Image (cartoon, rainbow, N blue to C red):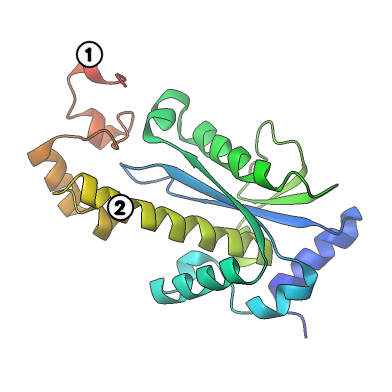
Amino acid sequence: MLTPLVEFDRQQALDTGTNFVIGIDEAGRGPLAGPVVAAACFIPPSLVQNFSDVNDSKKLTETKRKEIFRRLHENGVLFGIGFASAKEIDELNILQATFLAMRRAAQKLENLPHALVLVDGPYPVAQLPFTQRPIIDGDAKSLAIGAASILAKVTRDQYMTQLDQLYPGYNFATHKGYGTAKHLQALKELGPCKEHRRSFGPVRRLLPHEDLFLP
């Protein structure tokens, strides 16, 4: 029996006459530090039964996300990961940087002919060379988007854990760059590092005006 998320993708494919449904989602739009990370994911129909437990990454425990992440890597799923750095977020704004990360992720699946891309959220991705449909709350409706949300979230969490080693004192491994009380306190005590988003208010307020957008 097909799960609702599998059935959703199947119906999207039937509606558009394609055999390839790619899901795209991102992680890290809200944090004060680190990149925004996007994933594009295609699960072949022969493999969908292996992922009946996929859901919006925010509804899963960290342990469950990591377990599904491992299976996505090991079971022949096709996916791409794209990053947009804190510097690019400051230069472009967070929405355009998110689109950039999504394009970078989707480029790695360009060999899927006539694919339909389902994008989590209300907006189509600017300059994306695929037929696409934005799906509000798509990570809870679509298997492909739900899988992409897990790939993006776990990849970004791993990256932020690595940053914790490069920039000790900010506790990036714990809060992943979000504006928690401890992160804000560390910002006041240590000042921003190169991975902080200077265009975001809590960071910007700690910078001299002339330093706001320096590399």
Furthest toward the bottom, the residue is 1
Residue 33 location, quadrant: top left
Residue 63 at x, y = what percent? 40, 76
Q: Is residue 137 visible?
A: yes
Residue 35 location, quadrant: top left
Residue 195 at x, y = what percent? 30, 37
Residue name at image x 30 percent, y 52 percent: 162
> In this rendering, is residue 215 above or below 102?
above
Q: Quadrant of the N terminus?
A: bottom right
Q: Residues within 10 Å of mark 2 (few under 14, many from 20)?
A: few
Q: What residue type is disc 1 on?
A: Glu
Residue name at image x 33 percent, y 28 percent: 199
Furthest toward the top, the residue is 210
Q: Earlier in the sequence, mark 2 or mark 1?
A: 2
Residue name at image x 17 percent, y 29 percent: 206
Furthest toward the right, the residue is 17
Residue 50 at x, y = what percent? 66, 79
Label disc, if present, on residue 8 of the rendered structure: none
Q: Secondary structure at mark 1?
A: helix
Q: What residue type is disc 2 on?
A: Gln
Residue 72 location, quadrant: bottom right
Read off the residue under disc 1: 210
Q: Quadrant of the C terminus?
A: top left
- Of badges 2 and 1, the one in the foreground is 2
Q: Is residue 99 left or right of residue 44?
A: left
Label disc, if present, on residue 162 of the rendered structure: 2
